[in-house]
Amino acid sequence: MSLDIDYYELLECERTADDKTLKSAYRRMAMQFHPDRNPGDAEAEARFKAVNEAYEVLKDPQKRAAYDQYGKAAFENGGMGGGRSGAGFGDFSDIFESFFGDAFGGGRQRGPVRGADLRYDLEISLEDAFHGRTTEIAIDVAAKCGDCEGTGAKPGTSTRRCNLCGGHGKVRAQQGFFVVERTCPTCHGRGEVIEDPCRKCGGEGRVDERQKIEVTIPPGVDEGTRIRVAGKGEAGPNGAPAGDLYIFMHIARHKVFERDGTTLFCRAPISFTKAALGGEIEIPGPDGSKHSVNIPEGIQSGKQLRVRGAGMPVLQGRGRGDLVIQIDVETPTRLTARQKELLCEFRETETGEECPQSRGFFDKVKEFWDDLTE
């Protein structure tokens, strides 16, 4: 049963309706006449098919323009109004493409259109970046329809040859002395059209669903590292191959360490007595091991000590970077009476040789002042 009704009337909208209005009208009508909501009603099923056919034409700007000018005759008997085959060619690039194709890299893609690639941002801890791990993520993706296996046709039915291009996937139009060939606007180059669309996907061959994907993170990943999961992007239309999923890594801020490539940095405050007398401190690594660091006598604030091979692993390589400890000498602020007494005794015995940098600085200040007052 076919319905010979104007497409705009089928969708109950004006000819001036914008894309948003058309889409809203299509969804409303498709829901109203969906076979699942009208079991056994042949008229409702025919109406549902007609609504799908109308929206398939009107959602495409080229097909809509052809329909507005020629009506349904634009898509019958291989012609598009007045015996012209193909849609109008509004710019020189279409003519150029017809003559030179892909020779200059400018031609359109032929054959099935691969699905879109997807991006997912994943934050992990520094420890996970050190050891690597396997984790599971969930993404919303346009996946291949399980009912029609991505064909878009209702299970048990098949597609038919496109009337506009005769199954070639291309149409021709004459412009002056030129005959220009381009992709068929009705079947989009497939050479076939869907008469009875799949109820689950509406003929798209794809449905939106949430998928869980297991991801293996290798040791040594850094901020911005990209992991590719092949074939886990959006499914291509009408059974075309799926795109890829790209996972971008982000490393959470750590309580102790900062990172630059494979080098780890940390700041270690030490007492002024340990700085003066020397000693030893322990710094834990991200792998759980402890590194003993020797503090030489007389170390100053800002001095950096390096532990070789105690940093991050090299991504997809061998070896590890270094751990760099910056020493910060801390001046005590909470002294007991006895401690103050001992410091006063120490001050009485100072000769200036204990702190050569301090003595050198004030000697230069004195010389500067003497030069100004002479």
Image (cartoon, rainbow, N blue to C red):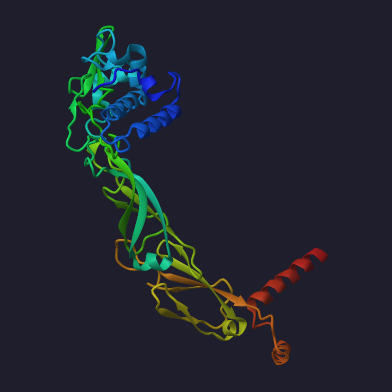
| Residue 138, quarter of picture | bottom left
Identify the residue at horizontal 33%, vertical 24% (top origin). Answer: 54
Identify the residue at horizontal 31%, vertical 35% (top origin). Answer: 38
Image quadrant holding the C terminus, namely bottom right
Q: Can see residue 374?
A: no
| Residue 289, quarter of picture | bottom left
Identify the residue at horizontal 28%, vertical 30% (top origin). Answer: 45
Q: How many marks?
A: 0
Q: Looking at the image, is 226 positioned above or below residue 357?
A: above
Q: Can see residue 205?
A: yes
Residue furthest out toward the front: 40
Toward the viewer: 197 or 246? 197
Identify the residue at horizontal 29%, vertical 44% (top origin). Answer: 143
Q: Looking at the image, is 364 positioned above or below residue 224?
A: below
Q: Position of residue 272 (x, y in %)?
A: 61, 82
Q: Looking at the image, is 277 positioned above or below residue 304?
A: below
Q: Position of residue 195 (x, y in %)?
A: 23, 28
| Residue 250, quarter of picture | bottom left
Q: Position of residue 322 (x, y in %)?
A: 41, 69
Toward the viewer: 347 or 221? 221
Toward the viewer: 313 or 204? 204
Q: Relative to residue 128, is residue 43 drawn left or right?
A: left
Q: Relative to residue 351, is residue 22 drawn left or right?
A: left
Q: Relative to residue 365, is residue 118 drawn left or right?
A: left
Q: Position of residue 242 (x, y in %)?
A: 26, 43
Residue furthest out toward the right: 373
Toward the viewer: 186 or 291? 186
Image quadrant holding the N terminus, namely top left
